[in-house]
């Protein structure tokens, strides 16, 4: 098949939600409906408790297991759908932001009882900043939940975009009758079912069909009034507005009951965009161009304990990837020739033969590939946009047994490159490393992994720092001057970018006021 044809049938999206909204359940049902798995329950099994926040064994388990299913590829209606999972726990939100750089659309799951929750808002801000089109699924209508109209306006308020319902619930909780498919003017009748797909006997045609009014009485009356109301008030769906991130189509359902899932899958095929062009610093990369290029957006160490390998997750930006191809790492100019590349077809780590723009490939390597690296057939390309956020929590790290200092350094370098934690080398502290995190759990995971994967028992000690800002200046001398004057507060991160460490926001403000020529960044973009 030609490259343009393959690109046109790719859909790559991330599924995002606040924990417990039903992301895992919906993921599993999407796979079920696409025929990628036979029995529901297999995705569920991987999920470990995210609430035992101090129990890093659980986290470790989650990390280990979620890897295999962090990217899932399935075929549905002649489309190849790549679904990227995002970590549920907010302490790993940096990971999520990076995953969002690798997708063309997002599917947002909202618990109809809770509405828009804090973690969702953060994720939405990232989608908004990137103009990522969002499809909304409002879940758990089989429960007593909030009023659909209220949910819609809440979504609109938080998203700053119009919510355009494609379906509308008739009743809820014990009286949940089903959803009305507004665009196709028919109702899908709700039947509780765990492991089967839709079947068409559940359809009643026409909102005006007397069968509906008779069967669902007041609930139907209410739903049809509401539908009338939103049809008068809400804008019509506009594909361009959706693609530009100004409108979100909204679906209602109950993932656990397989209800509304088919509609979401169809929406992904019909509405979500195929991979588009991506701006490299040098030029625009088109998905259908003949030469391969791809970006590392995630690195996961030690996926397979037997091999102690690191897998770089690469989103194909353009061209075709073939196994055994020679690729060049733009950052270093090094050549690699990946043979045992993995794909993620229906959760098996299969060997992959070819991949196109939008696909994710996993390349095992020993540290050659880092976050943000670009792979091409030879051309030097750089992409920006892979975000690193200034840490808000800091700890000093020491090795318990000085003979294991080397292991500690190796471990921290690798975990830093993977983005599991940020590692800073203070200029002044006699080489003692400083760890920075966005969430507390990151420290626990890192300490645990240092011990189990690198055989380095680390001691984490409190640090007086509470903020870090990356530094740049148009005039290198201005930067030098600032760094010399504040040497006790300067550290370098894994890519040797200088940062200012502060113990309070007041201290940061003073520095900003005194050195107007220096810029202090709360975010660093790779590249
Ligand atoms: P995640 O944390 O977003 O991945 O959420 P899960 O998929 O693990 O779901 C969280 C909880 O909500 C689980 O107990 C699910 O069984 C339950 N759940 C998911 N979907 C539904 C639904 O449609 N209706 C009801 N009543 N419960 C659901």
Image (cartoon, rainbow, N blue to C red):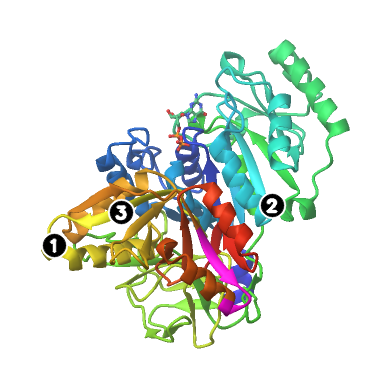
Name the spot of residue 466 as percent of width and height, x first. Answer: 45, 48
State which tag comes first along the sequence, 2 or 1: 2
Name the spot of residue 237 as percent of width and height, x first. Answer: 79, 45
The residue where tag 3 is placed is: 396
The residue where tag 1 is placed is: 402
In the rendered view, would you say 1 is above or below 95? below
Quadrant in the rendering for residue 426 = bottom left
Residue at 52% x, 37% y is 18
Q: CA distance from mark 1 to mark 3?
A: 15 Å
Asked if the residue at tag 3 contacts the one at tag 2, i.e. Cβ–Cβ closer than 8 Å, the answer is no
Q: Secondary structure at mark 3?
A: strand
Q: 307 or 27, which lies in front?
A: 307
Q: Residues within 10 Å of mark 2 (few under 14, many from 20)?
A: some
Q: Secondary structure at mark 1?
A: helix
The residue where tag 2 is placed is: 271
- Tell which tag, 2 or 3, sits nearer the viewer: 3
Name the spot of residue 39 as percent of width and height, x first. Answer: 39, 40
Q: Secondary structure at mark 2?
A: loop
Quadrant in the rendering for residue 1 = bottom right
State which tag comes first along the sequence, 2 or 3: 2
The reply to whether residue 398 is in sight is yes
């Amino acid at each position: 098949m030609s490259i343009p044809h393959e690109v046109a049938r790719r859909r790559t999206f991330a599924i995002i939600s606040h924990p417990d909204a039903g992301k895992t359940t919906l993921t599993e049902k999407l796979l079920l409906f696409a025929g990628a798995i036979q029995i529901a329950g297999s995705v569920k099994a991987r999920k470990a408790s995210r609430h035992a926040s101090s129990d890093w064994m659980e986290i470790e388990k989650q990390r280990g297991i979620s890897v295999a299913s962090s990217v899932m590829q399935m075929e549905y209606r002649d489309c190849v759908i790549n679904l990227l999972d995002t970590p549920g726990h907010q302490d790993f939100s940096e990971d999520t932001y990076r995953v969002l750089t690798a997708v063309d659309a997002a599917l947002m799951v909202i618990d109809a009882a809770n509405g828009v929750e804090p973690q969702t808002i953060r994720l939405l801000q990232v989608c908004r900043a990137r103009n990522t089109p969002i499809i909304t699924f409002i879940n758990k209508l089989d429960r007593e939940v909030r009023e659909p109209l209220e949910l819609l306006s809440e979504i609109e308020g938080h998203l700053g975009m119009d919510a355009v319902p494609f379906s509308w619930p008739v009743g809820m909780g014990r009286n949940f009758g089903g959803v009305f498919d507004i665009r196709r003017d028919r109702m899908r009748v709700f039947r509780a079912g765990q492991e089967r797909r839709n079947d068409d006997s559940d359809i009643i045609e026409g909102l005006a069909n007397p069968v509906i009014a008779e069967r669902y009485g007041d609930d139907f009356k209410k739903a049809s009034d509401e539908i009338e109301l939103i049809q008068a008030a809400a804008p019509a769906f506009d594909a361009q507005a959706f693609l530009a991130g100004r409108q979100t189509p909204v679906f209602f359902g109950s993932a656990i009951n397989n209800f509304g899932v088919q509609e979401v899958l169809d929406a992904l095929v019909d509405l979500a965009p195929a991979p588009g062009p991506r701006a490299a610093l040098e030029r625009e990369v088109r998905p259908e161009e003949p030469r391969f290029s791809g970006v590392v957006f995630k690195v996961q160490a030690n996926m397979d304990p037997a091999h102690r390998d690191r897998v770089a997750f690469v989103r194909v930006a353009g061209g075709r990837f073939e196994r055994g191809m020679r690729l060049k790492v733009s950052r270093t100019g090094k050549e690699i020739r990946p043979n045992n590349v993995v794909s993620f077809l229906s959760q098996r780590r299969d060997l992959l033969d070819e991949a196109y723009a939008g696909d994710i490939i996993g390349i095992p390597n020993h540290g050659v590939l880092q976050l943000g690296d670009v792979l091409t057939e030879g051309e030097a390309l750089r992409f920006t946009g892979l975000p690193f956020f200034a840490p808000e929590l800091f700890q000093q790290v020491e090795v318990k047994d000085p003979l294991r200092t080397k292991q500690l350094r190796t471990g921290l370098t690798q975990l830093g490159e993977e983005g599991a934690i940020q590692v800073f080398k203070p200029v002044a502290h006699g080489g003692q490393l400083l760890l920075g995190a966005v969430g507390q759990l990151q420290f626990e995971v890192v300490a645990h992994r240092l011990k189990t994967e690198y055989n380095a028992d680390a001691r984490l000690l409190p640090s007086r720092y509470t903020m870090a800002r990356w530094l740049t200046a148009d005039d290198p001398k201005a930067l030098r001057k600032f760094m010399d004057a504040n040497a006790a507060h300067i550290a370098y991160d894994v890519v040797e970018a200088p940062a200012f460490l502060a113990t309070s926001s007041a201290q940061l403000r003073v520095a900003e006021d005194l050195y107007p020529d220096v810029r202090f960044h709360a975010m660093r973009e790779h590249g």
